[in-house]
Image (cartoon, rainbow, N blue to C red):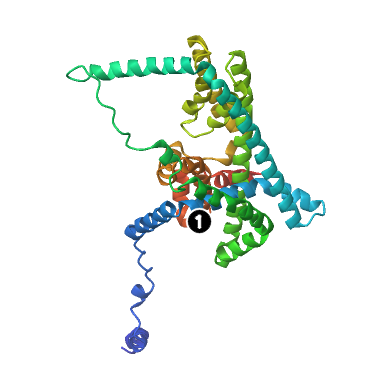
Amino acid sequence: MSQATTNVEPGREVEELSARKRLPPPDVALSPPPARRKDWALGVMGIGVLLAICYFAEVTIVVVLVSALIAFILAPVTDLLTRLRLPRTVAAALVILILCGLLVGIAFLGINQADNLVSELPKYSADIRHDISKISRKVRNLEAIGTPDGKPPRPRQPASDWNEMVTRGFGSAAEIILAASFVPFLVFFMLTWHEHARAATVQLFPPENRHAAHVSIGLISLMVRNFIIGNFLIALMIGALSTVVFALLHVPFFYFAGLGSGFLSLVPYLGLVLALLPPLFLGIGHISLSSVLWIAVAVFTFHVLSVNVLYPLFLGGRLRLNPLALTIALLIWAWLWGAVGLVLAIPITAAMKIVFDHVESLRPVGAWLGENIARKRRPKQGSE
């Protein structure tokens, strides 16, 4: 009996101690806490708020993003001048002045060439009007086929104006000039204060996340710089090839048409169609139908060459984006910012993917956007 009593005593002591401290039983106290339920409604509301901010603050955000893109391009040149014992402020100001001088020179040459083009237009304006009238007559005849009385329907007012879509959010030309005047100053301060801004941005994060923030900012800078330089080189190559072909086909102002076609081919998804416009417009009344077909074949060939050869060569693994996600991103940013959003959609989406890849809770979203390059390289480093 005494042995049985001694066996029960420890259990009673544990129960009395638990009751005294008002603790739950051991099996309940050691059980893991229930998982936090994710509130998807708050996430959707947050995304809606961000989209609303991007829509209503279009001018401010676009000016800052364009300034950041230019600063990423000019940063290596500024660093080179700094290593040559020039002060950082002097180097940044010199680089910006050189860039502004180049832009003014290009604009001056473009205005002169455009003036020559306008002066040449009256010489074949009759041919242009004749060709346009033939096309519009055929279009009206096709429209009359589907009507009950056989008459062409009345022209309707288009649902959206292309000019409004391209310049939506910027207002008049004065507002565009005012917004563009901030770009050189923003670029200057981004070049002179980039180290401080980068370090201060990293310090905004908790200590355990600062390394990931530092790596993400570095990868975004490298991606944006490679993206812009790569696209610029591709546009120059396609423009040079197009200029040679258009010269052989005797397209008027072939140098204008070639460079314009090369740079317009960079527009996502619409580049193939837009690249046809400069040579066809300048060639109205001067080129035959066979030349039009050769122009279409050349533009299509150069577009396929840029997408399948030049883009992987110059950009390579910098942009590992899912085509479906990229198409959705182009649709969203074009809806928000018009033509400007269509141009900025790819670097913005690529930057978002880099951030998602370095945030533990958002890595599934980054994996959906495209391949995780850092995760792909880890097994190779371990095997070595």
Which of 291/24 is in front?
291
As displayed, is residue 63 above or below residue 325?
below
Q: How many marks?
A: 1
Q: Which residue corresponds to mark 1?
A: 359
Question: Which of the 4 quarters of the picture holds residue 23?
Answer: bottom left
- Picture quadrant of residue 34: bottom left
Residue 257, position in %: x, y? 57, 24
Q: Amino acid at mark 1?
A: Val
Q: Position of residue 50 (x, y in %)?
A: 42, 56
Residue located at (57% from left, 17% from top): 251
**In the image, what residue occupies the spot 29% across and 16% down?**
141
Q: Position of residue 127 (x, y in %)?
A: 47, 14
Depth order, front residue of 243/4: 243
Quadrant assignment for the C terminus? top right
Q: Relative to 333, is 241 on the left or the right?
A: right
Depth check: 48 or 261 in front?
Answer: 261
- Determine whether 178 is above or below 160 in the image: below
Closest to the observer: 5 or 268? 268
Question: Going by the picture, which residue comes out furthest to the right?
Answer: 85
Crowd class of label 1 (few under 14; some 14 to 19; many from 20; radius 10 Å): some
- SS type, badge 1: loop
Please state, as top left, top right, bottom left or bottom right, where the N terminus lies in the image.
bottom left
Q: What's the residue at 50%, 45% (across, down)?
A: 173
